[in-house]
Image (spheres, rainbow, N blue to C red):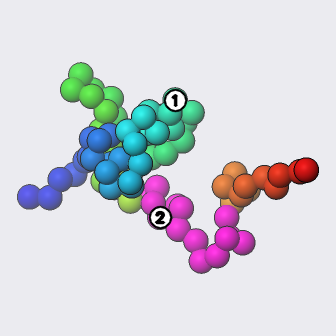
Amino acid sequence: MEKSSLTREELATRWHIKPPTLDDWRRKGKGPKFSKTDSGISYKLEDIEAYEKSRTFQSTADYPPELKRKKKTS
């Protein structure tokens, strides 16, 4: 049986990031939707995949404004 959700640790491993990064994103309202229960934070696989799809681009020109890096001024 395939899992239908991942813990924060499992998602962090999937994305090669540290779990505190996911904590920070939740506080800032970034990242995929999540559920909080007495047993902790979990992410539905369908929400993870939807988030990943929303961050898939053909080129950097396709990035939405919130993902474009601001140019540094010297």
Residue 70 covered by magenta stretch: no
| In the image: residue 40, left or right of residue 22 | left
Relative horizontal placement of residue 62, taking residue 49 as reference (left or right)? right
Point out residue 57 in the picture as x, y percentages from the top left corner. 58, 71
Q: Nearer the viewer, residue 20 or 7?
A: 20
Q: Please, what secondary structure does the residue beneath circle 1 have? A: helix
Amino acid at pointer 1: Arg
Q: Which residues are magenta?
A: 50-63
What residue sits right under mark 1 in the picture? 27
Outermost residue, left side: 1
- The answer to whether residue 42 is above or below residue 74 is above
Return the residue found at the far bottom.
58
Q: Give the residue type at disc 2.
A: Lys
- The N terminus appears in which quarter of the rendering? bottom left
**Residue at the image point whose x is 33% and y is 55% from the top:** 14
Residue at position x 31%, y 51% in the image: 13
Q: CA distance from mark 1 to mark 2?
A: 22 Å
Most extreme residue toward the right, as rendered?
74
Number of numbered markers: 2
Disc 1 vs disc 2: which is toward the camera? 1
Q: Is residue 50 visible?
A: yes
Q: Position of residue 62 (x, y in %)?
A: 68, 70
| Residue 45 in picture, x, y percent from top left | 30, 53
Residue at mark 2: 53
Above or below for 62 versus 69: below
Q: Is residue 44 visible?
A: no
